[in-house]
Amino acid sequence: MNKIILLFVCCFVITSISAQHGFPEGHYCNSENGWKTKRCKALYGMKKEDFNKVIVIPHRGLWGTPGIPETSLIAIQEAYNKGYMFCEIDVIMTKDRKLILCHDQQPNRMTNAPATFSNNGGVDDPGNFFRSLNYNTTTNNSVPDTNGSMYPIFPALKDLYYKDRQGNITNQKINTLEEALDFCKDKEIILALDIKVSKMSDPVIKNEYLEVMKLTLELAKTKGCLHQIIFKPGSAGQVTLPEIQNYLNQYNLWDTFSKLTNVVLIDIMGNAFPLATNKAYIDSWLSLPSLIGVEYIYKNPQDELIIPKSEFGNKSIVQYTKDKGFKTGVFHPTPTDETGSPGGRGSYYNPKNYGTLDDLRGSLEFLFGVPNNVFPGMLVTDRPDSDMDFLELFNLNSKYTKRSTVN
């Protein structure tokens, strides 16, 4: 009888832990040791609490000052040193299957790589995208110079140095995801990983995207830090859950992805995102056990993501998601010059009328002037410190932004 009672108590405790912490079975944050950490408290906060407060997440690390390049290990370290609980970073796979930290498809803007034939951040690979370059060895006779002739020898990526925001070459060599995980694994910080590929509509490139997911899971599993990473599918183009499941099942990693790590879906309108308003697509992601939030990238007050739709019960997609119990987020980029810049910072200002916004993501007044039913709970931003100052004016800062306020 005593054994039966003990068994009942143990089952009750295990069930209570799972219910209390709200993570899938087996997730580290459901464990007694995991729940003691601030990183698990912050993940819980992102999933379950403070829906009317805003978690600020440094975009590409904490960078911008001279000598601190974007999407680099030192940018992650800066975010940690400033006390941020979350840090977004970009990951790319090289030709020799090394996972490196870089935002652009091409190395020219962000590193001291030699100039190449196409350096405009386009989607077509003329041989100078990271997926065509080797990390560990030189890439020979296949990388075009500015005239279209092939370099006899293009340097190994591991020997290149990042540039900072001002375009100055720093003393920071290209970093790997492994280096980033080694830094983070025993610290109270969570890495949100944005996998970069050039054209998800290409089956070969989509396969490479899925391979990056697989390699990342294996790496984080080996280092015991699965709970410290957030995958961000959707930014480079749409991928469906069945596609991910079919690929990861080959390596017995589907449960690892769907239960033991964390996911924030990115959803955005555009030609590369045909499923952005598809209810079945949205519902499939909202049913994923490891999903902890959705980052909706809406650009204007008439964006399809924030206007009511009959198929979502006459609610906006953002409101529908919030009503399902998920925090939603937005992206606040750094506006650039008239022409924008290769590889992602875009032309957030109108090139024909410099100073006139044509993409309202650059306006915090817009992002936080939306109705409460689409109000964001996460802000991924290139200038987190100043945006926190803005939010503080309206008492909107979440305690889960900084390590010092997580308890």
Image (spheres, rainbow, N blue to C red):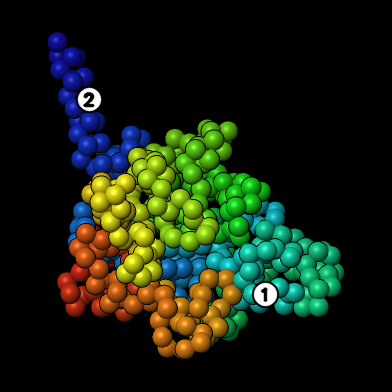
**Is residue 404 among the parts visible in the rendering?**
no
Q: Which residue is outermost to the bottom?
A: 354
* Secondary structure of residue under mark 2: helix
364 or 171, nearer to the observer: 364
**Is residue 52 among the parts visible in the rendering?**
yes
286 or 7, nearer to the observer: 286
Residue 218 drawn at (x, y percent) = 53, 43
* Secondary structure of residue under mark 1: loop
Q: Amino acid at mark 2?
A: Cys
| Quadrant of res 26 | top left
Q: Amino acid at mark 1?
A: Asn
Q: CA distance from mark 1 to mark 2?
A: 59 Å
Q: Residue at x 18, y 14 (%)?
A: 4
Residue 48 drawn at (x, y percent) = 23, 50
| Residue picked out by circle 2 | 11
Residue 310 drawn at (x, y percent) = 29, 49
206 or 36, nearer to the observer: 206
In the displayed structure, would residue 350 be above or below residue 267? below
Locate the N terminus by quadrant: top left
Q: Residues within 10 Å of mark 2 (few under 14, many from 20)?
A: few
